[in-house]
Image (cartoon, rainbow, N blue to C red):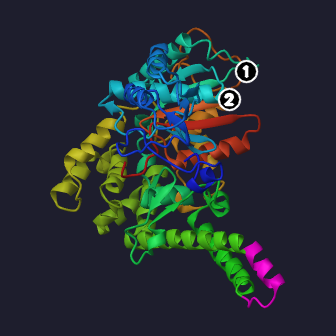
Amino acid sequence: VVYTQSEILQREVYLFERLDSPSREPMKHLKAICFLRPTKENVELLVQELRRPKYSVYFIYFSNVISKSDVKALAEADEQEVVAEVQEFYGDYIAVNPHVFSLNLLGCCRGRSWDQAQLARTTQGLTALLLSLKKCPMIRYQLSSEPAKRLAECVKQVITKEYELFDFRRTEVPPLLLILDRSDDAITPLLNQWTYQAMVHELLGINNNRIDLSRVPGISKDLREVVLSAENDEFYANNMYLNFAEIGTNIKNLMEDFQRRKPKEQQKLESIADMKAFVENYPQFKKMSGTVSKHVTVVGELSRLVAERNLLEVSEVEQELACQSDHSSALQVLRARPGSGGSGQAGGCGVQFHWDQLPGSLSLGSVRSSQADGSCLLPAQLVSAVVEYGGKRARGSDLFGPKDAVAITKQFLKGLKGIENVYTQHQPLLQETLDQLIKGKLKDSHYPYLGPNTLRDRPQDIVVFLIGGATYEEALAVYNLNRSNPGVRIVLGGTTIHNTRR
């Protein structure tokens, strides 16, 4: 995620080994750079390494705060004095986008309570993020979520304990950490996506910037796994937030540009000048060729899956249930084509989860009756579990829109501006929450401060963290909020980055 292997080779790093690998050979002519999390297991492995060093010198970097007792254990093990440096480099998280990070944790809670090991890991990752950004924030949390309050308290304890590390230069407006719970908006991770990055993650899966294409029919060997990184791929950087229709047009333009350049590069090499020009241009041509092959393959597979799973119709139903008050046409589609409930179990849960929120004939009871007559293939336990996790009784917010007359009128007038795309009507709850926060209107009664102090001014530096995971739709919302609010910087994080399968 930080470096590609080719990039790190340019830094004269030629060998990559795991500390727990049993087959490593001594190489006293090499220096070793160790970068690891300061866990008990890693410290013990390092102690064993230093007792029988395989390299001439060791530069040790921990991704988070290491205890004095662990440093002492390392010093005692370094009898041959091979350690040149020990430092803390706070990188105990995955930087996904310039404004998005993840801890790559699944199943952080058991029911409505934290798994204690996951709470400790989340606290470590979140405090490392704050240290790397040099922020000592005021903390707000979602009142309706006990896990949010618990995490807020744990982060505050670390800040208090390590006060010297958090002694950064004070700003006019203090930074703010806002801790939220995924259960307040369980719909967003269940919707089909139509922007490039979100769509790739939903249909193919992004794991540390890598895409597994090994199951694509007829895939060539060199494209079975590809890397999508905005830092190293200009096309991806320029298109990751565009919708699928625009991606198709831009892929066509990329192909045409490649075809225009291709004949020139393949002309006969009749002179030294021709050869020199070819050698100078070949790396750029080869890189462009790889970019074209990669994105044509990815977009082609996305198109195949959209058609195979009938996702256009599915998504239209999802969007109507999520965003419109009249669900009659969606209900007709579902009754006419029961398979339109979603692309697999998660998609079906997304549609049926909405029904728990609606009165009358669209209640959860109608879902269960559809299960009884065979028109719904989802297990009743699965639907019930989703509703228990994020249904209206579990939430602290009004996920499906306002109920008072003034708010409904505002929403109606906002809707009159028109809908650019029927498949991207939905806006995640996070967008409204952050918009209220930026305007200074987020209610303290729903999102209290931890401690007696409160912000007098509108926040400018905001870190928002979602227990239970964030989504790429929310990443897009934060990206747009950053662009539309000069002077405001929002960083979004989560225990994981969701799609409907995780």
In the visual, does 157 lie left or right of 392? right
Relative image position of residue 241 (x, y in whole percent) = 61, 56
For mark 2, give the secondary structure. strand
Q: Amino acid at mark 2?
A: Asp
Query: Which quadrant holds residue 185?
Result: top left
Camera sees residue 442: no
In the visual, does 355 lie left or right of 288? left
Q: Is residue 353 magenta?
A: no
The image shows a total of numbered marks equal to 2
- Residue 173 shows which numbered tag? 1
- Residue 461 shows which numbered tag? 2
Query: Going from the N terminus, do you reach mark 2 or mark 1 first?
Result: 1
Camera sees residue 460: yes
Query: Which quadrant holds residue 20?
Result: top left
Relative image position of residue 93 (x, y in whole percent) = 51, 36
Asked if the residues shown at circle 2 and circle 1 are in contact, with their CB atoms under 8 angstroms apart, the answer is yes
For mark 1, give the secondary structure. loop
Give the residues drawn in magenta, as a range: 267-281
Residues packed near mark 2 inside 10 Å, few (<14), some (14 to 19) or many (20 plus)? some
